[in-house]
Image: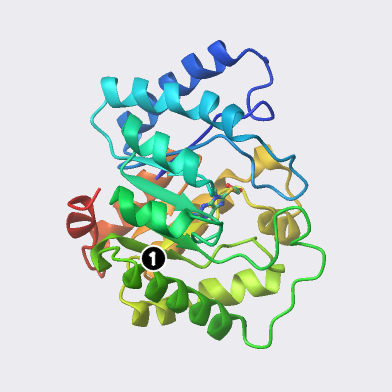
Amino acid sequence: MGILNITPDSFYDGGLFLARERALRRAIEMVEEGANIIDIGGESTRPGAAAVSVTEELDRVVPVIEAIRDTVPVPISIDTSKPEVMREAVAAGAGMINDVRALRAEGALATAAELGAAVCLMHMQGEPRTMQENPTYGDVVAEVREFLGARRRACLEVGIAAEKIIIDPGFGFGKTVAHNLTLLRHLAEFKVLAAPILVGLSRKSMIDKVLRLPLGERLHASVALAVLAVQYGASIVRVHDVRASCEAIRMTEAVGQRPEYMSSLASCL
Ligand code: 8Y7
């Protein structure tokens, strides 16, 4: 899954038109580099990021979804928590909803069910603005797994098909470095939830905490984490550096030992 952020803080040149053009070009490039899904986000979920209105978010993402839909045959994921954005994004061509709030916003669960899109349910402790202040768990693996199991059951209850549900422990979302490392080491324990696992570790600050590296210098560590995530059982890795990640993952796959989830997953997107 290649990351496509359409936010002013990712596009320093300002203009929305330029940002859209640039986003389309990057999407095409990521598909050429091996991405099987493009995840489009119009609101930053980084700690401390400002909230974005529905209109602003729609303005950012809908034209880009339409442009990608008309240009490259790749499944499109919309990274949002807002039911209105889910609705317009799916109408524009998105087949998947990636929600860091796991459909807990008012109306989100019912909307996702009605739209019939695939959903990624991510665990987050707290809210983006404050979640890194003091993350606390008794048993982080058990608690995150309980949460994802409960959200998965909530999805099934409103009629979302089991094969359309993806789970994600939410690395960096209300977690210390120790929590993140523990979750990754125990990723295989999430397989009991019988859903494909999505993992996002690309360029995250835990790399800085371990290696003391700024954002622009986290490529090698990110690739290592993507490979490890796949080996520990991830079916989808959400990455910025598609080419490097795909090459590393394909090479390790050639060595063997990996079950094939992607073919069954592709059919629901
Ligand atoms: C994740 C995510 C982000 C993640 C899923 C970043 C939107 C922060 N991280 N979605 N989104 N999983 N499913 O650093 O880990 O990319 S935003």
Q: Residue at x 52, y 45 (%)?
A: 80
Q: Is residue 172 left or right of residue 27?
A: right
Depicted 212 relative to depicted 79: above or below? below
Q: Nearer the viewer, residue 134 or 62?
A: 62
Query: Residue drawn at (40%, 57%), measured in percent from left and top?
Result: 110
Q: Position of residue 88 (x, y in %)?
A: 41, 34
11 in relation to 97, above or below: above
> Residue 106 falls in which quadrant of the image?
bottom right
Residue closer to the observer: 177 or 38: 38
Q: Is residue 162 above or below residue 264?
A: below
- Residue 112, given in percent of the width and then of the height, sits at 38, 53
**Residue 212 position in % (x across, y down):** 76, 53
Can you tell which quarter of the image residue 109 is in? bottom left
What residue lies at 62% left-to-right and 69% top-to-bottom?
180
Instruction: Give the structural element (helix, strand or loop) at label 1.
Output: loop
Along the line of sight, the residue nearer the viewer: 27 or 207: 27
- Tell me which amino acid carries mark 1: Ile
Q: Which residue is mark 1?
A: 197
